[in-house]
Image (tube, grey):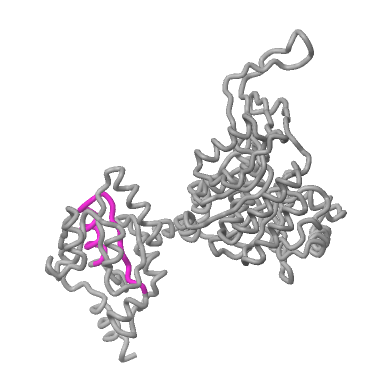
Amino acid sequence: MDRKTVESLFSQIDKIRCLVVGDLMLDEYLWGKAERISPEAPVQVVDVLREELRLGGAGNVVNNLAAFGARVSVCSVVGDDQNGWSLLKEFGRRSVTVDAVFLDSSRSTSRKTRVVAANQQIVRIDRESREALSAVFEKRVCDWIAAHAGEFQVVVLSDYNKGVLTPSVIAATVTAAATAGIPVLIDPKGADYSRYSGATLLTPNRKEAEAASGIAIRDAATLTQAAKVIMDTVGLQYLLITRSEEGMSLFSKGGEAVHIPTVAREVFDVSGAGDTVLAALAVGIASGCDMAEAAGLANIAAGIAVGKLGTSVVTPQEIIDVVALSHHDSDSKIKSRDVLALLIAAEKARGKRVVFTNGCFDLLHAGHVKYLQKARGLGDLLVLGLNSDASVRRLKGPKRPLICEDERAHILAALNCIDYVTLFDEDTPLELIIALKPHVLAKGGDYSIEGVVGREIVEEYGGRVELVAFVDGKSTTNLIDKVLERYSNE
């Protein structure tokens, strides 16, 4: 995926509704230093300096989805205890819908306490219930999912083998989602994957895939064999096997395997990385990406997650920054309208004065460059609205443009005087001006102020229109005529 695609995806993510079903838990971190041995026993003494509670298990999937900006609902059962109430409070802080988180006084909410010193985990203490849901709560979960599954674009099952995802709950979820035409993504546990029958995709790691298939994965051939066994057993459309430093492998029913190399720069902690993978897959698929694109997005997110200590979230900007590293050209300045509107709002909040101009800019010449340099001098940054190919044809005739929109955008974005380029398909940039609300609207000196499209709107909110003189004799039409004159006889 390129940077523009990823930016566009995250700019629309607040329209995505995701349902997460699974085992919720609290991850407690005690951060400290260990500089002495206990006189009572040959163990380290950790002086605790900081305590932290994080969402764990399926809660970490929810946390990642919320950090991405998606609208998330969670369905689960936790204890009617202090830890359960703390979980609900943490979800509330993230605007996560918890109408389907049921409190069972007979269960203990899972809490995992990790003691960390010098960035090294010393010990983990688990307090939890592992038994399957009672028949009463199992029915409540199944009934809620059957009634509400159709409200979401994707359903995620996060199985930590703590009793919430019983065979009945899994079957009810898969059936309800299939009826509504919604994909079901599952992070599995255990060796018996037949319980996930009918799911769209499973995301086991290599060790889990070996246990489920009964095949030791040692090379590409055994990896493919293991994948086939799992897919045939579950009736999967897709299988994504995560392979640590070797990246990921995506298998599809009737298709070629796609092997995705890792992008991790430095590994500190792999805990929670599978949750990040599941969340990134979910938003990718719900946004309309194909499965290979969604897997690529998940791979990038996982590479960021393992560079953090403990169960952590990955932000959209972190993903965009990683993608941008592989696109060092002028592509980084070319934005979609939705993304650009968000960026410009942020620039304004920082006190920047925004200048906007527009045009076809077919066959870029010195007159264009001088005009753009002058326009840039009217404020702190210059946004260029570029007519699409279809728009140019309507304005200039069927033989134009000579240079396609992608090439024109890249050429213009390479100019230092231009901060952002965005394409528009309309005959005029009016809708773009309304969306961006620039402080200054710049047009060529061949216009009258009264004839500038968008003038009334800009002046109404306190902006202004500036006319910038063109260099005489410099135009695309003159260039075309000169070429025809010189080469027509040949």
Q: Where's residue 34, x and y in %?
A: 66, 18
Residue 374 part of the magenta-drawn span: yes
Place residue 446 in its image quadrant.
Answer: bottom left
The residues colored magenta run 368-388
Horizontal side, residue 162 vs residue 222: left or right: left
x then y, percent, for residue 256: 72, 68
- In the image, 353: left or right of 174? left
Q: What is the total number of numbered labels drawn onto the structure image?
A: 0
Q: Quadrant of the N terminus?
A: bottom right
Identify which residue, 153 or 266, lies in the foreground: 153
Residue drawn at point x = 83 percent, y = 58 percent: 222
Foreground pick, 285 / 485: 285
Question: Which residue lies most toward the front here?
Answer: 136
Residue 26: image location, x then y, percent: 64, 34
The percent coordinates of residue 30 (x first, y second) are: 63, 24
Residue at x 24%, y 58% (from the top left corner): 373
| Residue at x 49%, y 58% (from the top left corner) | 9
| Residue 255 sits in quarter | bottom right
Q: State the residue lying farthest toward the bottom.
A: 489
Question: Quick check: 209 left or right of 383?
Answer: right
Camera-side residue of 27 and 43: 27
Q: Quadrant of residue 78?
A: top right
Residue 312 lies left or right of residue 158; in this view the side is left
Q: Nearer the viewer, residue 192 or 268?
A: 192
Looking at the figure, which quarter contains the C terminus? Answer: bottom left
Residue 490 falls inside the magenta stretch: no
Identify whether 453 is placed above or below 55: below
Query: Looking at the image, is 198 positioned above or below residue 62?
Result: below
